[in-house]
Image (cartoon, rainbow, N blue to C red):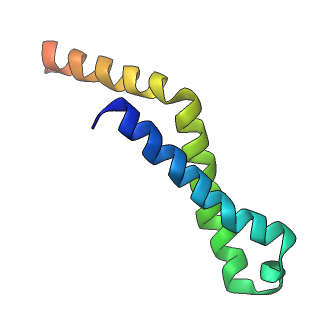
Amino acid sequence: MKASTERKLIRWLHIILGIPIIGYIYGPISENQIPTIIVRFVIFPLLVLSGLYMWKGYIIKNWIRKQKRRMHVNPKN
């Protein structure tokens, strides 16, 4: 996957996941228990992870690349 496509995909995921948060804050969703649980324990963590990935994802990618190189050069470790 090209880097630009990946950025667009993560960005749109982040925007779409933000919509239920707005409904949770400003709407009557907080009165119902099941949507509240979904927003708190599924949507919000995914929103946070996608934001962190957009912000510092290059560090994770570089770390994974280094690990792969290290395993390729020295397969015993």
48 horizontally vs 69: left or right: right
- For the image, the number of numbered tags is 0
* Quarter the N terminus occupies: top left
Residue 66 percent coordinates (x, y): 31, 17
* Quarter the C terminus occupies: top left
Please report the residue visible at 60 percent of the width from the left and 41 percent of the height from the top. 51
Please report the residue visible at 48 percent of the width from the left and 45 percent of the height from the top. 10
Which image quarter: residue 18? bottom right
Frontmost residue, 53 versus 67: 53
70 horizontally vs 73: left or right: right
68 horizontally vs 30: left or right: left
In the displayed orientation, state which residue is furthest to the top: 73
4 horizontally vs 17: left or right: left
Frontmost residue, 50 versus 22: 22
Which image quarter: residue 38? bottom right
Please report the residue visible at 30 percent of the width from the left and 21 percent of the height from the top. 65
Please say if 77 is above or below 35. Answer: above
Residue 57 percent coordinates (x, y): 49, 30
Residue 74 appears in the figure: no
Frontmost residue, 54 versus 70: 54
Please say if 43 is above or below 62. Answer: below
Frontmost residue, 20 versus 69: 20
Residue 52 percent coordinates (x, y): 59, 37
Please say if 53 is above or below 30. Answer: above
Please report the residue visible at 83 percent of the width from the left and 67 percent of the height from the top. 25
Residue 59 percent coordinates (x, y): 47, 22
Residue 12 appears in the figure: yes
